[in-house]
Amino acid sequence: MAESTARSRGDRRLRWLLASSAASNLGDGIGKVAFPLLAVTLTRDPLLIAGLSATQFLPWLLFALPAGALLDRIDRRRAMIFANGARAVVVGGTAVLVAAGGVTIWVVYAAALLIGFAEVVADSAANVLIPAVVDKGSLDSANSKLQACEIVGQTFLGGPVGSATFALFATFPFLLNSVGFAIAAAVLLGLAGSYRPRPAERASTELRAELAEGFRWLKNHRLVSRLVVVAGLISLVSELAQAQLVLYAIEYLGLSEAAFGLFAFVGGIGGLLGAGIAPRLVKTSSRRTVLLGGTACCGAAFAGMGLTSSAVAGAALFGLFAAAVVAVNIVLGTARHTLVPGELLGRVLGVWRTVVWGAIPVGALLGGVLTHALGSPAWTFLTSGLLLFGVAGFAFVSLRPGAFDDESATASRVLHQDR
């Protein structure tokens, strides 16, 4: 009876977290289509377009570490509420400027940067909350559901809504984006309980020591360290192409602005498929197999997109990429939650996100340079695909068979040694 009650309470808490995630991801999805489309109306320079993507993710490089340490001190639910509220205000202000005709490419950059800093806190807090609202045996399922919320919100709903409303009235998607973030903040008020991982009575001078503790744990845990490197390489290499997706669709494939949202919609179908099958694939094979196979599929999809001029084939291949990368992300997310002790999760996640998300602006800028030098985003997609095959090979060599089998024992041993 007690076990059933605890499971019911955990399911209820997960639903509140997923509802907030769904609302914020809807806002994200609208914004991630509307902001590039707004930028394209202001400039067609591939470097400036790539720079926007880099600006959106630059905060992960600058702020993920201190944000991780912060989340190991404060109530993570309250951090999410504050961050989503801040995003609602910034995007609402952008909507006002768009309506008044006072927006420039630099205004777009500034808004993207501010939203990015708030996103670091909101997304990191949501991630580290997962082990606090579900038991260990439900981590694969919970991570899959969180990925599904992201896909449905950002791609199935956000992408088409963002592109369609932008084509009708440029201000409208930014208003919807702001409302989505506001709802995400309000929904979290229903998530009962305290989510402060440990007592807050810590001197601010200990921040450096706490960050060093996270680094030491990560250094001593070889499996997690290698997973960080693999995840960072996937992020860097895939962003070469992803930052050029709007130019690939509109200039290379000749799609309209409204059709670009439908193109992304196909990616959402693939992403949902990946979220649905990843837990089953892990059970029938292994996490290592899913990680290696998913990375190779990402490479095949982007290489194929670089070689085709068909919008239908390009969209289908983008769907394959989305399915594969979501499956990879679920494997990495569950491994991280299983391996990292709860009291260190914020800091280790901060290091992880600094590497992985920090690689995105670097990859975006390099993708812009590649497209500018090669003359077509299709060549950038082909290059990214071939490099992803190389990342799969590196992962094959770095992660031995059975590497994930003794996760819990390894984590406990490393934590004991660190102390």
Image (tube, helix red, strand yellow):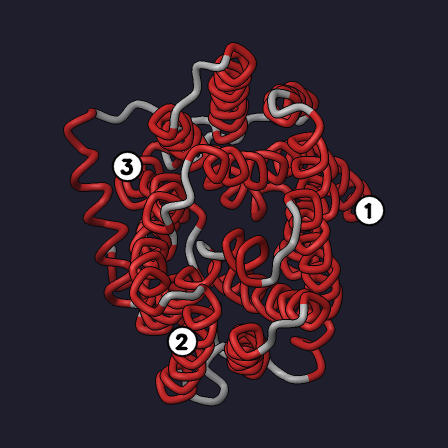
* Label 2 Cα crowd, 10 Å radius (few <14 / some 14-19 / many 20+): many
Please say if 56 is above or below 368: above
Does residue 71 appear in the picture of this structure?
yes
Q: What SS does tag 3 mark? A: helix
Kind of residue sitting beneath label 2:
Thr
The image's mark for residue 383 is 2
Q: Decide which of 8, 19 is in the foreground and name it.
A: 19
Query: Where is residue 166, by image quadrant?
Result: top right
Q: Where is mark 1, residue-wise? A: 4
Instruction: Check disc 1 and give the amino acid type.
Output: Ser
**Residue 310 higher or lower than 129, as above or below:** below
Residue at point 52%, 45% (across, down): 127
Left or right: where 134 falls relative to 412: right
Q: Say what amino acid the circle numbered 3 marks.
A: Pro
- Given contact means CB atoms under 8 Å apart, are the residues at marks 2 and 3 in contact? no
From the top left corner, tell me how far across and down residue 226 is, in percent. Answer: 34, 72
- Inter-mark Cα distance, 2 to 3: 34 Å
- Give the residue number, with chain letter if any, for mark 3: 66
User: In the rendering, at what x and y percent does residue 403 appear?
Assistant: 45, 81
